[in-house]
Image: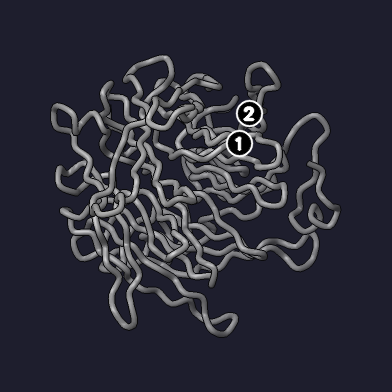
């Protein structure tokens, strides 16, 4: 069963509350809508990816909108004065041509403030691109767009996922299609030496053929998570030994070798009670465990624990079964201090417009699930497909619809904050 088109789909200081405009609610959580997208015909709209942040601003991509209607990169800057509105700036509007079309996922930012991302479509072959946006030399100037790589099918196609940055500047990502067998790749894009061009290399081509290659997964919707050792971890939404997708590891070449090594850490069972078809990636938690969620079979949150002895089997357990029709599609977020996990469900909650949930780690028992907020589909937004950003004790996120028009099936979505 394939889901590749589904998504076209701590008490803080008083000063922080004043700037962000959030305050704790007695007995319940409440979100603060920081900005309602799609207010004009050229505004960014319908974000599908999570946010990133620097000291003053949030950054994200919108799947539609912008000057040409093919999506945009936006910046949302917090106000200098308490209670004032946040300010949105469109940093770049995609034309739908060689520069790309329809950015789906989260941006990455390097130490100099340069943004990197992907578009699922557009480019010379229509198979998507990798791009970078450099900040202006003078504050208030225009950001500078550069095309890093254009996908052409054999090297990958349709990168729904964004990229992650290694400390050496190499970008890693996935495509849901293309590659040797047409069902997705893991790739790297290597920065140029003096005056040269970026170089893309396919590290792994997934397969849906019968036999062992298909057992290793295919059609990765999510991107990869990079370990300090340079190993990549990710998920596929399809194929695998049980046809429900997999969690995989891709290790750099061993000394004297040139090929990356792929291993399946867990195979989900299509139609199984644990959930299947993960569309989000995995994150690192305590004790080197991986955490993620599944999209199909209502959805679940799982923990994947590494073996006690190197080379042994990883152990998977479901730590929370989500309510019916929840559809967890984004990455989870973990609080490094408390170990609490936060996530979103795109169609869960009391109003079937999505919700925000938390999982508190056990103290000798089970994880504790809490529904933190149910979106109404009106001014607060609807359908939070992406995961959350935890910054300064505040969870920041996006919804794909609702907001300005106050209707669940329309509107450009919202950017919100919540104090868990």
Instruction: Decide if residue 339 is in sight here.
Output: yes
The residue carrying pointer 2 sits among few (fewer than 14), some (14 to 19) or many (20 or more) residues within 10 Å by Cα, namely many
Is residue 18 or residue 409 the one in the foreground? 18
In the displayed structure image, the side of residue 371 where residue 116 appears, left or right: left
Q: Which mark is residue 359?
A: 2
Residue 276 drawn at (x, y percent): 38, 25
Q: Which residue is rendered at x = 43% and y = 40% of the image?
A: 281
Dividing the picture into quadrants, the one containing residue 367 is: top right
Mark 2–mark 1 CB contact (< 8 Å):
yes
Residue occupying the point 34% across, 57% down: 119
**Residue indicated by mark 1:** 342
**The N terminus - image quarter:** top left
Q: Residue at x 31, y 63 (%)?
A: 100
Relative to residue 403, is residue 166 depicted above or below? Answer: below
Report the quarter where the C terminus lies: top right
Query: For the residue labelled by badge 2, is the local secondary structure a helix, a strand or a loop?
Result: strand
Disc 1 packing (10 Å; few <14; some 14–19; many ≥20) = many
Report x, y in % for residue 333: 57, 41
Q: How many marks are shown on the rendered structure?
A: 2
**Residue farthest toward the right in the current orientation of the protein:** 14
Q: Is residue 16 left or right of residue 51?
A: right
Q: Residue at 63% across / 23% down in the picture?
A: 369
Residue 18 sits above or below residue 132 on the image:
above
């Amino acid at each position: 069963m394939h889901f590749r088109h589904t998504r076209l789909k701590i008490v803080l200081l008083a000063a922080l509350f004043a700037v962000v405009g959030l305050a704790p609610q007695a007995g319940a959580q409440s979100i603060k809508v920081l900005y309602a997208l799609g207010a004009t015909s050229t505004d960014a709209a319908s974000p599908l990816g999570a946010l990133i942040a620097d000291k003053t601003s949030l950054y994200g991509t919108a799947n539609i909108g912008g000057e040409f209607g093919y999506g945009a990169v936006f910046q949302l800057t917090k106000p200098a004065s308490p209670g004032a509105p946040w300010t949105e700036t469109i940093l770049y509007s995609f034309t739908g041509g060689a520069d790309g079309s329809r950015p789906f996922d989260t941006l990455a930012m390097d130490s100099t403030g340069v943004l990197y991302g992907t578009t699922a479509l557009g480019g010379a072959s229509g198979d998507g691109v990798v791009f970078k946006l450099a900040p202006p030399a003078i504050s208030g100037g225009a950001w500078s767009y550069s095309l890093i790589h254009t996908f052409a099918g054999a090297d990958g196609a349709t990168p729904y996922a964004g990229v992650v940055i290694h400390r050496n500047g190499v970008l890693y990502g996935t495509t849901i299609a293309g590659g040797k067998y047409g069902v997705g790749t893991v790739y790297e894009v290597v920065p140029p030496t003096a005056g040269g061009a970026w170089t893309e290399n396919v590290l792994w081509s997934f397969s849906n053929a019968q036999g062992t290659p298909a057992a290793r997964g295919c059609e990765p919707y999510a991107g990869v998570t990079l370990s300090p050792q340079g190993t990549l971890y990710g998920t596929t939404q399809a194929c695998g030994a049980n046809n429900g997708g997999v969690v995989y590891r891709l290790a750099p070449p061993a000394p004297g070798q040139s090929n990356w090594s792929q291993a399946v850490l867990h195979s989900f069972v299509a139609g199984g009670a644990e959930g299947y078809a993960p569309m989000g990636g995995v994150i690192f938690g305590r004790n080197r465990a991986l955490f993620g969620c599944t999209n199909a079979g209502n959805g679940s949150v799982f923990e994947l624990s590494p073996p006690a002895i190197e080379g042994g089997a990883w152990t998977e357990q479901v730590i929370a079964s989500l309510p019916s029709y929840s559809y967890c599609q984004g990455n989870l977020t973990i609080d490094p201090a408390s170990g609490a996990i936060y996530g979103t469900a795109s169609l869960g909650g009391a109003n079937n417009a999505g919700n925000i949930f938390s999982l508190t780690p056990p103290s000798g028992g089970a994880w504790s699930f809490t529904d933190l907020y149910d979106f109404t589909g009106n001014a607060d937004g609807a359908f939070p497909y992406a995961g959350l950003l935890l910054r300064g004790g505040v969870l920041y996120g996006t919804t794909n619809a609702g907001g300005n028009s106050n209707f669940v099936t329309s509107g450009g979505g919202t950017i919100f904050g919540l104090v868990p």
